[in-house]
Amino acid sequence: MRSFLQKTLAPRVGQVLVAANADEADELTRRHRIDLVVLDIAMPGRDGITWLKSLRAEGHGCEAVLITAFADLDTAIEALRAGASDFILKPFRVTQILNALRQGLERAELRRQNFVLRRSLSQRTPAAGGLVGQSLAIRGLQAAIQRVAGVDSTVLLTGESGTGKELAALALHRHSPRAAGPFVPVNCATLSAELIESELFGHAWRSSDGTRQLHDGLFVYAQGGTLFLDEVGELPMALQATLLRALEERRIRPVGSEQEVPVDVRIIAATHRPLAREVEAGRFRPDLYYRLQVVEINLPPLRKHKEDIPALVEHFINTLAPQLGLPPIEVSPDELAFLAQYDWPGNVRELRNLIERSLILGALNVSALYQGLARAEARTPAPPAPVAPLTTDLQTLEKNHILAVLASVGGDKTRAAQSLGISRRTLERRVAEWGG
């Protein structure tokens, strides 16, 4: 029976391991991560149901299909209570066992997809789509991603906050051979030092009835896919050593467990910190830094490719308006020219937030940018004479923008002031200056 099942299943699944009894099966579960077990009830030594109960008590949540030639209703009920996901009577047809395995693996995959989806929704994982823009900087970034995506090497993404490192990681995943697997992101800066180890590697505990429970970590949920470690520079030093070991040995040990679990994931890490300086300062392990820096890709800040702003504005309007259930807004050439004069310290994320806020308010809302430019001008020495017309141009843009917002709300100064993010008194003073 074992030989028959091995020959039947080997061409259809990734790997088939066989055991003649419960002791051999115990050894396999210690050395391998098992997705599904086909288990006979009548075995020498411990029977199948007894072994399955012990497997569940140790925290293994793999799917289990039980087969037997001698069964009654009580046996079937006991098997289901022990954690069996399916129950097949001998003799059976090949299609029966294949259907049982397919359904079991689909259930396991569905649980993993649900977990990844919940994390994606809670962490606002970027939607499908490529890196937007046709500037020289973005074309170079796209070419680098295409070259690196096809190999399984670890990638370190660097760049300022808001430059789109998670979007670049997602593009690497979707152009890789692992695209059919999950993309699991985790922001290392948002988890406490007490939680991040169990979040990454899982943890085991004893329940009230004395049985052992095992909670899978993100490494397990990312099996066959990509694990994206955002802000990896925020990891505590103690956890950096554990992560290094996991990367080198491709095995993890859940917190509180004695069992190691093999993992098959690609690691993409990202940081806004210069990790080389963090190594010099003793805040980041040099061996982990060199392990992550197999391939390093730097993402340019938005101020270095402002020619992509019109394309980014159009992209954000087209994607965010349907999500928010709001009509798109019109952005004039003068307004686009004004956006190009701002240096965008928050990079693409700041531009995205501006467009989202503007869609909610019904018009491009640049009051915060005026304040940012004013602060920048206050910190900058007086410009030479050729640059002087810029201030007048900004004043004209400000006037046109305020008057356009007033017109869009039918002259209601209270609503216009709210949309512009200024007080009604300030709005009235500006309009009075223009003779309005």
Image (tube, helix red, strand yellow):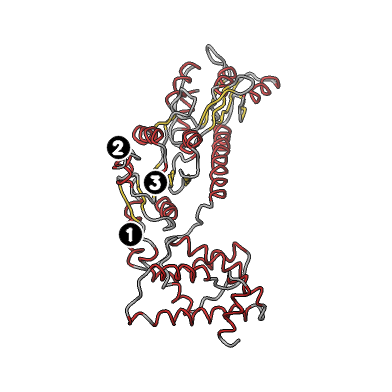
Residue labelled with disc 1: 143
The answer to whether any part of residue 308 appears in the image is yes
Q: In the image, what residue type sits under mark 1?
A: Ala
Neighbours of disc 3 within 10 Å: few (<14), some (14-19), many (20+):
many
The quadrant holding residue 97 is: top right
Residue labelled with disc 3: 268
Q: Nearer the viewer, mark 1 or mark 2?
A: 2
Residue labelled with disc 2: 287
- Find residue 46 and name its label: none
| Lower sequence index among marks 1 and 2 | 1
- Give SS at disc 1: helix
Q: Position of residue 353 (x, y in %)?
A: 52, 62
Q: Position of residue 213 (x, y in %)?
A: 57, 26
- Give SS at disc 2: helix
Q: Nearer the viewer, mark 3 or mark 2?
A: 2
The quadrant holding residue 57 is: top right
Q: Nearer the viewer, mark 1 or mark 3?
A: 3
Neighbours of disc 1 within 10 Å: few (<14), some (14-19), many (20+):
few
Q: Position of residue 421 (x, y in %)?
A: 58, 69
Name the residue at 37% across, 55% down: 159
Q: Decide if residue 356 is on the left or right side of residue 293.
A: right
Question: What is the C-alpha distance between the residues marked 3 and 2?
Answer: 16 Å
| Lower sequence index among marks 1 and 3 | 1
In the foreground, 66 or 143: 143
- Tell me if residue 436 comes above or below residue 129 in the rendering: below
Q: In the image, what residue type sits under mark 2?
A: Asp
The answer to whether any part of residue 311 appears in the image is no
